[in-house]
Amino acid sequence: MEAGNLLFYFFIIFTSAKIMGEICVRLRMPPIIGELMAGVLLGNYVLGIIDNSNHVLMSFAEIGVIFLMFHVGLEIRVKDLFAVGRTAIFVGILGVIIPLVLGFACMIFLNYEVIESLFVATAILATSVGISVKVLQDLGLIKHKVAYIVLGAAVFDDILALIVLALVKGLARKEFQTIEFSLLVIESIAFVGFLTWWGPKLAAKTRRWIEKLNIPEGPFVISVILCLGLAELADVIGLAAIIGSFMAGIVIDELAGVYDLENKVKYVNEFLLPFFFVMMGAHLDPRVFLEPRLLILILLVTVVAILSKMIGSALACWKKDWKTKIQIGVCMVPRGEVGIIVGLVGLSLHTITQEIYTVVLGMSLLTTLVTPPLILMSFRKKRHKSSTPAEFK
């Protein structure tokens, strides 16, 4: 891709996302709905302006969601995360087991092969928390107790999803490496555990060293290095990069207020994040909704994906009131890029058909599209008294 073309794509993606976001704000809807729809319009299947397989644009999309989760980590207090730890773990466990079972049972009932059913079930169980987090941020609810539960559950959810995907890949290849699999599990748990327990303490000891740096905006530069470094380390281990960036925010949480890191990262997000939502929307082919048989299958799998997360959250939070159960459940609904990645893995291994991949893709994007309005409805009474469209900006 030439530099001139790249600048054009940056211009058209960013501008379209903001215009569509503004329209949604005026219609009292979360702006990310507009950004996703901008992606649908610009993608291969409508106007054909952007290519959803373009590696440069997809890389920018990934960086966008990495910085979103980094920003969220900066706003989260470790002690508050520990306070909801038990509930978050139960939500994470049941939010994996129930979608896996129901998704597999649904596909088997429809006479699909075992391995195809397993891949669809794996795509259903993994939560893409970036969508929910953005909506909660826009509503000023990122420090709400429900947000802490969802974030904690999402980290645990990602580890379990990784384990299930490794098992399914092994079955698809008809080989299973016990040692490699065990190392994967141990490394994932050690990564999250070490950074949660010891990361903030180690970061606090570096303050004096950071203040001696002569480079402009030294603390911000170091925080970005940590964010990218832990995102890459998480990716190497096999976890999602966003888990690494979220943990980076958790690690330097105590330094964030001192150096005003939250506000500085916020402006980086304003530029990068629209690329993530637009590129997610660009994967959706509206023509699939014109094929009755495929449409019915996509809708059925989407319903199973939504209900299974809601049921899992309700069972995990059985002591809480129904409103809280619903709020947690809807925040765990989006599959987004996680489901798409699982589908691509199955396609690359030649274990699922193009039709099944389309179903996984449709389910991933539909759950992403319905989540913002569902969150908005479930938190309706939690909104500020001066409820205006500006609250989404």
Image (cartoon, grey):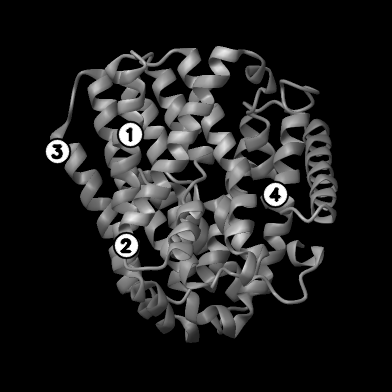
Q: Is mark 3 on a helix, strand or loop?
A: helix
Q: Which quadrant does the C terminus fall into?
A: bottom right
- Crowding at mark 3 (Cα within 10 Å: few <14, some 14-19, many 20+): few
Q: Is mark 4 on a helix, strand or loop?
A: helix
Q: In this view, does 130 lie to the left or right of 197?
A: right
Mark 2 or mark 1: whose residue is earlier in sequence: 1
Mark 2 or mark 3: whose residue is earlier in sequence: 3
Residue 318, label in figure: 2
Q: In this view, does 313 lie to the left or right of 49?
A: left
Badge 3 amino acid = Ile
- Residue at numbered disc 3: 179
* Viewer-proximal residue among 230 and 303: 303
Where is residue 34 drawn, in percent x and y?
A: 76, 44
Badge 4 amino acid = Ile
Q: Distance between the residues labelled 2 and 3?
A: 37 Å
Where is residue 111 drawn, in percent x and y?
A: 33, 13
Where is residue 328 drawn, in percent x and y?
A: 46, 59
Badge 1 amino acid = Leu
Q: Distance between the residues labelled 1 and 4?
A: 29 Å
Give the residue displayed 69% in from the left and 51% down from the top. Answer: 272
Q: Distance between the residues labelled 2 and 4?
A: 31 Å
Give the residue displayed 64% in from the left and 44% down from the top. Answer: 276
Residue 168 visible here: yes
Badge 2 amino acid = Trp
Q: What element carries label 1?
A: helix
Where is residue 37 drawn, in percent x and y?
A: 74, 37
Q: Nearer the viewer, mark 1 or mark 4?
A: 1
- Residue at numbered disc 1: 102
- Residue at numbered disc 4: 32
